[in-house]
Image (cartoon, grey):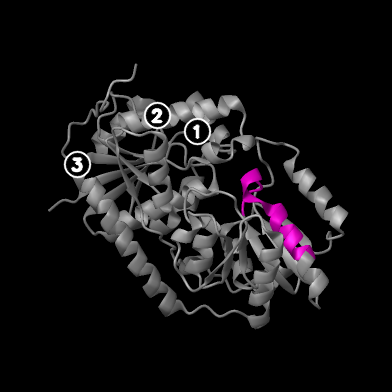
C-alpha cells in the first residue's frame, strides 16, 4: 500500500538555523511513524515575499535564500529517505503538490491562500511581544498581533512547541477557531554531528581550557548580560581562569547597537579575556565545543520552546544545562537541567559554582547507545503527536475556510 505523502512547507524556516532545526525535527517525527513519505518543499531563490520578510524581521531574523546546492547540505542526512522539491510561488507549489500527490502541508508559518490545493497545518512561534513589548517597535507589535489573529482564524489545526504557547494563544485570543496542539519536548541525539576533532577546534577557535558555553543568537531577550555578570562574580570567588564561550549570530535587527553595548559592558567589567565570541559556526563545530564545556548556560528571558534550541542540544548529547526558571523552561523535567532565577546573576553564579565543583576536567565521552535510545523514545512520542494531528486533517476539503469571519 502506498504511503500518504506529507509536504514539509519550508517557507520562512529556511535561512536561519533554528528554522532548519525545527523542520528536521518535524521530519524525524513524521518519518518515525512509518506511515508517511516526506516531500520537503523549498521556495526558490527569488527574494522572499514581503509578508514573510516582515514576519521574520519581527522575529529579529534575516531570511537568506537557500542556494540550490545548499538544500542537500542542510538536509543531506535525510536523503534518499525524503524527496526535495524547489518550487516558485503558489503555482509552483500547486504543481509540486500535484506531482507528488501531497496530502497535507506542515508546518505553515503563514496562512496559505485558498488556491493552495492541499490542506495545511499552521505553526505559531511565541508571544514574546505580549510579555516584552519594550523589545519591539509598535509597528512590529501590531504586525505580530495581526499575524496571530489571522492564523488563529484561518487554520483548522496549529502546532506549537510548548504548552506555554498554547496557553498564551487561548489567553490572548479567546474564542479563536483553531485547535492548537503542543508538541512534546524532543531533544534529538544525532551521532552524525560527532567529530573526533576537538584538538583542531580548540586551536582553530582559540578555546580556553575551562569554559561554560552559550549558544544563542545575540537577541535582546537572550539576556547574555546576566551570564557575563555571573561570570564576573564567579571569577572573583573561584580560583582558575573559568571562561565563557559564546556562539551565534551577533546581529539583532531590532537594535543594531546591542552587540557593541555588550562588548562595552564586558570591557568595563574587565572580562575581555574571559569571554569568547565565535560568531555563527557550523552545527558540527557547535556540538564539538559544547561536549567539552563545563555546562551550557541558557539565560533567556523568553522562549517559544522549552529551553530554546541550545538546551535541546545539551540534553540530546548528555551535557548539563543551567537555564532560567521562566515558566516555559519549567516544562523540562530532566536531571541534566539546573534552574536559576531569571535575570539574577548572583543566583546564576551560585549554580555555575555548584556545577563546576562537580565537573571532571577530562575529555567527555558520549554514551552513544544510551543517548540514541533516549532520543528514539522521544522521537516516537513526537511522531505519535504529529500523527494524531495529521490524521484529523487529512481528508477534509483542500480549501480550509475561516472558522469565523473577521470584520
The vertical placement of 305 against 366, above or below, is above
* Extreme-top residue of the structure: 407
Start and end of the magenta stretch? 216-232
Q: Quadrant of residue 251?
A: top right
Q: Residue at x 61, y 56 (%)?
A: 342
In the image: residue 247, left or right of residue 19? right
Q: Is residue 222 magenta?
A: yes
Report if the CB atoms under discs 1 and 2 are less than 8 Å apart: no
Secondary structure of the residue carrying tag 2 is: helix
- The residue closer to the viewer here, 291 or 169, is 169
The vertical placement of 291 against 95, above or below, is below
In this figure, which residue is indicated by the disc labeled 3? 394
Tag shown at residue 156: none
In this figure, which residue is indicated by the disc labeled 1? 45
Q: Is residue 111 magenta?
A: no
Q: Main secondary structure of the magenta part?
A: helix
**Dot 1 alpha-carbon crowd within 10 angstroms: few under 14, some 14 to 19, many 20 or more:** some
N-terminal-most mark, 1 or 2: 1
In the image: residue 379, left or right of residue 350? left
In the image: residue 313, left or right of residue 93? right
What is the CA distance from the residue labelled 2 to the residue labelled 3? 24 Å
Query: Residue 108 at x, y = what percent?
Result: 37, 38
N-terminal-most mark, 2 or 3: 2
Tag shown at residue 149: 2
Amino acid at each position: 500500500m502506498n504511503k500518504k505523502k506529507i509536504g514539509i512547507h519550508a517557507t520562512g524556516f529556511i535561512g536561519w538555523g533554528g528554522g532548519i532545526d525545527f523542520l528536521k525535527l518535524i521530519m524525524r517525527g513524521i518519518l518515525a511513524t512509518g506511515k508517511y513519505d516526506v516531500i520537503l518543499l523549498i521556495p526558490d531563490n527569488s527574494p522572499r515575499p514581503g509578508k514573510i520578510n516582515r514576519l521574520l524581521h519581527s522575529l529579529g531574523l534575516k531570511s537568506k535564500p537557500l542556494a540550490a546546492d545548499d538544500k542537500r547540505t542542510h538536509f543531506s542526512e535525510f536523503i534518499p529517505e525524503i524527496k526535495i522539491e524547489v518550487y516558485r510561488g503558489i503555482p509552483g507549489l500547486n504543481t509540486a503538490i500535484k506531482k507528488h500527490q501531497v496530502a497535507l502541508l506542515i508546518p505553515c508559518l503563514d496562512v496559505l491562500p485558498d488556491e493552495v490545493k492541499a490542506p495545511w497545518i499552521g505553526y505559531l512561534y511565541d508571544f514574546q511581544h505580549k510579555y516584552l513589548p519594550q523589545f519591539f517597535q509598535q509597528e512590529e507589535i501590531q504586525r505580530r498581533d495581526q499575524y496571530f489573529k489571522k492564523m488563529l482564524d484561518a487554520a483548522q489545526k496549529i502546532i506549537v512547541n510548548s504548552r506555554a504557547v498554547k496557553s498564551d494563544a487561548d489567553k490572548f485570543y479567546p474564542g479563536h477557531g483553531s485547535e492548537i496542539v503542543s508538541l512534546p519536548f524532543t531533544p534529538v541525539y544525532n551521532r552524525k554531528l560527532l567529530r573526533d576533532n576537538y584538538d583542531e577546534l580548540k586551536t582553530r577557535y582559540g578555546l580556553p581550557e575551562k569554559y561554560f558555553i552559550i549558544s544563542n543568537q545575540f537577541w535582546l531577550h537572550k539576556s547574555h548580560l546576566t551570564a557575563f555578570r555571573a561570570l564576573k562574580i564567579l571569577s572573583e570567588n573561584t580560583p582558575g581562569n573559568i571562561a565563557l564561550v559564546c556562539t551565534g549570530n551577533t546581529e539583532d535587527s531590532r537594535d543594531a547597537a546591542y552587540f557593541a553595548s555588550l562588548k562595552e559592558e564586558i570591557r568595563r567589567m574587565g572580562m575581555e579575556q574571559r569571554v569568547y565570541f565565535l560568531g555563527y559556526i557550523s552545527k558540527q563545530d557547535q556540538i564539538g565545543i559544547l561536549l567539552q564545556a563545563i555546562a551550557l548556560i541558557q539565560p533567556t528571558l523568553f522562549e517559544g520552546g522549552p529551553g530554546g534550541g541550545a538546551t535541546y542540544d545539551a540534553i540530546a548529547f548528555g551535557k548539563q544545562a543551567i537555564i532560567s526558571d521562566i515558566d516555559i523552561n519549567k516544562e523540562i523535567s530532566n536531571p541534566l537541567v539546573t534552574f536559576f532565577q531569571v535575570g539574577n546573576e548572583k543566583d546564576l553564579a551560585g549554580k555555575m559554582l555548584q556545577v563546576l565543583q562537580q565537573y571532571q576536567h577530562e575529555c567527555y565521552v558520549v554514551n552513544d547507545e544510551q543517548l540514541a535510545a533516549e532520543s528514539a523514545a522521544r522521537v516516537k512520542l513526537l511522531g505519535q503527536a504529529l500523527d494524531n494531528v495529521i490524521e484529523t486533517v487529512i481528508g477534509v476539503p483542500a480549501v480550509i475556510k475561516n472558522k469565523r469571519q473577521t470584520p
